[in-house]
Amino acid sequence: MLAGFTVGITAARRAEEFAALLERRGATIMHAPAIRIIPLVDDTELRRATEAVIADPPDIAVATTGIGFRGWVEAADNWGLAEPLIEALGAARSLARGPKAKGAMRAAGLREEWSPESESSAEVLDHLLEEGVEGKRIAVQLHGATTEWEPIPDFCEVMRSAGATVIPVPVYRWLPPKDLSHLDRMIESAINGELDAITFTSAPAVASLLGRAQDTHVLELLLNAMRTRVIPFSVGPVTAAPLETLGVATTQPHRARLGALARHIAEELPRRARNLQAGGHHLSLRGSCVVVDGEVKQVPPASLAIMRALAKRPGMVVSREDLLAVLPGAGDDTHAVETAVARLRAALGAPKVVQTVVKRGYRLALDPVHTHPTEDR
């Protein structure tokens, strides 16, 4: 199903479980955690916020994630503060962003007053603004750190502008990974078209990836790759928001769940692959290989670059000079093109797929029927 596809995983949490779901479907995985989570019990910011909630209980408490809220209570328990924290939150009106946050609140003995069907922070914000928050003290369980790409910090700023006193509770505080080499390699692979897809399961992971690309001066190259040939998959709309804001269209499952995301990837990637019928064979181009009549064929990088260039202009002659331009470090000798084409034919095991046009160049020998052009990814 996903044989020959290479999928990038940016998740730090449950990455092994997610990778297993995709590997069982045949995918090759590149894992580069984009964030690292600070252990909650060691987080001085969380403890400071917890003590502020206990010292002056809020009028309204907002839980945004189930695991985050449970982690908050567990951390408070380690500090000997769980009982006073639950007592302070119990005196407040409680709102939960979705069913997982709702379940975590109920497990702590709290009862939510309201929760949106959309599981959207924006709808929670609209609900609060509609009823009025001026003069209210509101505790908001957040995740991540403020960056220019994350939408959640704006939640607090909007309520402050409306007259509320806001206590942000940074349960999901994150930092970039200590070793950035894996993240750099993933960014490079996306830019070079070696990835078919890159997956995101949290907005902080998106923010961290974009921030690293900006720091290394390749942000526009990365965004262009995700707008064209590398499909960005998001677990849900909150995670997708930073990319969508930058004009990168993501694709998401109907339910914001890990299993649903894996199934969605298995359906979407084959559908979006470039499929061609040439030289009597069915070809499917993927990030690091070509599938010929259902069999994965590993192709050398230079030969794969030739194949991609020919596939962009299916059936048309592409000159040796134009093909030379796509070869990494080929110099100005068109003999490098002839070598790459010979290796391509050998790797495919289908020499008639690529046709030599004397004195002009090369073309894909498209079959006259059953040719299905698809989008250029």
Image: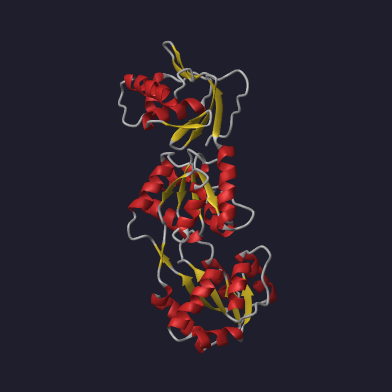
Residue at position x 58%, y 56% in the image: 236
Residue 58: name its quadrant. Answer: bottom right
Q: Examine the rendering and report whether any part of residue 98 can be seen.
A: no
Q: Examine the rendering and report whether any part of residue 96 can be seen.
A: yes
Residue at position x 67%, y 67% in the image: 116
Residue 24 or 138: which is nearer the viewer?
24
Q: Is residue 179 left or right of residue 256?
A: left
Q: Position of residue 319 (x, y in %)?
A: 43, 19
Residue at position x 55%, y 84% in the image: 86
Instruction: Determine whether 120 is above or below 10 in the image.
Output: below
Q: Position of residue 274 (x, y in %)?
A: 54, 33
Residue 369: name its quadrant. Answer: top right
Q: Position of residue 232 (x, y in %)?
A: 52, 48
Instruction: Determine whether 210 is above or below 229 in the image.
Output: below
Q: Is residue 284 left or right of residue 192?
A: right
Q: Is residue 140 left or right of residue 35?
A: right
Colouring: secondary structure
The residue furthest front is 24
Q: Is residue 110 left or right of residue 297?
A: right
Instruction: Determine whether 65 is above or below 179 in the image.
Output: below
Q: How many marks?
A: 0
Q: Position of residue 226 (x, y in %)?
A: 49, 44
Q: Quadrant of the N terminus?
A: top right
Residue 125 or 181: which is nearer the viewer?
181
